[in-house]
Image (spheres, rainbow, N blue to C red):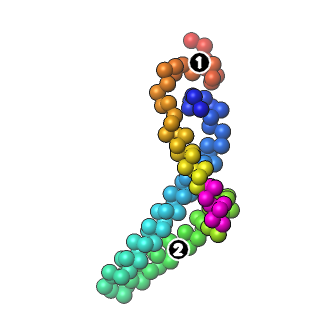
Amino acid sequence: MNDYLDPINSVGMPEKIDSAIALDLLITVKETIRNYSIALTEAASPEVRTTIRNQMEAAIDYQTEVIDLMKEKKWFHPYDVREQQVLDLKAAQNAVDIAALNLFPDNNNRKGLFPTPPQ
């Protein structure tokens, strides 16, 4: 990929972005559940423990929804290690490809690539 600004290079990008956002959401909700469990062991009053437990259960339900969505979209394969490994290798290659982009090309003239009004 020589020109990251060329629109042809954005083919498939929305799906990649959606899967990355879903993975970030999954990591965040897992961290939230872990924090709730720690807070639950530190809570002194029964009312606070009940509130934290209810919030943690809601977060667990949300995690289930996120995982179900990711499995449905084939962005996550929790029971097939080989399939998940292929997916992880593709994601790693995408990261390497993005890191290799020439973000400041010498020729930044985009005339002709997009409809532009005459000047």
Residue 41, how many percent across, how many down? 36, 82
Label ID, residue 111:
1
Left or right of 67 in this view: 37: left
Residue type (three-letter) at the residue carrying disc 2 = Ile
Residue at the location (46% across, 75% down)? Answer: 55
Q: Secondary structure at mark 1?
A: loop
* Viewer-nearest residue: 11 or 60: 11
Residue type (three-letter) at the residue carrying disc 1 = Lys
Label ID, residue 60:
2
Q: Secondary structure at mark 2?
A: helix
Span colored in magenta: 80-87
Quick check: can you spot residue 18?
Answer: no
Per the picture, the main secondary structure of the magenta-coloured stretch is helix
Residue 96, how many percent across, how many down? 52, 43
Q: Quadrant of the C terminus?
A: top right
Circle nearer the N terminus (2, 1): 2
Question: Is 28 rendered above or below residue 46?
Answer: above
Residue at the location (55% across, 52% down)? Answer: 20
Residue 102, how many percent across, how many down? 50, 30
Question: Is 32 rendered above or below residue 39?
Answer: above
35 magenta-colored: no
For the image shown, how many numbered marks are present on the structure?
A: 2
